[in-house]
Image (tube, rainbow, N blue to C red):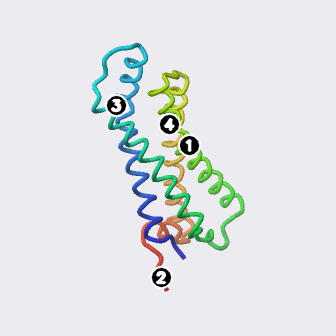
Amino acid sequence: MGYRRVQIALHWAIAVVIAANYLLGDDMGRALRTHLQGGEVGLFPAMMHVWLGLAVLVLVALRLGVRLILGVPEAPAGDPELLRRAGHLVHVALYVLMIAMPVFGVLAWYAGIGVAGDAHEIAANLIMLLAGLHAVAALFHHYVLGDGLMWRMLRAQSRH
């Protein structure tokens, strides 16, 4: 049993938006430092980063709502308990970070709280680390365990 189309679409949309925003992160770091020092900031890169960050927040809220309504597929039968627990922990951490990161960003940019900018940057790096671990785990399931787990997020569950 796999995920539904809406869950798959939200998963990949979030991944793409986070990756794009991560690439804009260095420019935003410089813009935030300039902004906090009262300097002029080129608005397009800064506002693009802010809007993409808010898009992440909205998409994650939608993803959590859909998750509550539709649930998630069971872990593959026979998975070791340690893998199940590690997978659950990584998913929880990703959700917490994907919510906290935009909030930290808003606090840094709009409230001028410098430490929130530091927390935002740390959260961004942790998300990249955990997303990489998440991808490696999917490949491990596919190529080493051969349990088909990766297909759940690549093709939608049929309605039947």
Within 10 Å of the Cα at label 4, are there few (<14), some (14-19), or many (20+) other Cα atoms?
A: few
Secondary structure state at the residue bearing disc 3:
helix
Q: Secondary structure at mark 2?
A: loop
Instruction: Decide: is 7 above or below 29.
Output: below
Specify the amino acid type for callout 3: Ala
Dot 4 or dot 2: first in sequence order is 4
Q: CA distance from mark 1 to mark 4?
A: 10 Å
Toward the viewer: 109 or 5?
Answer: 109
Residue drawn at the location 50% of the way across and 48% of the way down: 131
Q: Nearer the viewer, residue 80 or 16?
A: 16
Considering only vertical position in the picture, is 26 above or below 66?
above
Does label 3 or label 2 sit earlier along the sequence?
Answer: 3
Give the amino acid at mark 2.
Arg
Distance in Å between CA atoms under marks 3 and 2:
42 Å
Given this view, does label 1 or label 4 mark the residue nearer the observer? Answer: 1
Q: Is residue 41 above or below residue 22?
A: above
Q: Mark 1 or mark 4, which has the lower sequence index? A: 1
Left/right placement of residue 47 relative to residue 96 reads left
In space, the residues marked 1 and 2 are separated at their CA atoms by 32 Å
The residue wearing badge 2 is: 159
Residue 97's disc is: 1
Q: Which residue is mark 3?
A: 46
Q: CA distance from mark 4 to mark 2?
A: 37 Å
Where residue 66 sits: x, y (%)?
A: 53, 64
Residue count near mark 3 (Cα–Cα under 10 Å), binned few <14, some 14–19, many ≥20: some
Tell me if 92 is positioned left or right of 104 in this view: right
Residue furthest toward the right? 81
Q: Which mark is residue 125?
A: 4
| Residue farthest to the bottom, as pictured | 160
> What's the amino acid at mark 1?
Leu
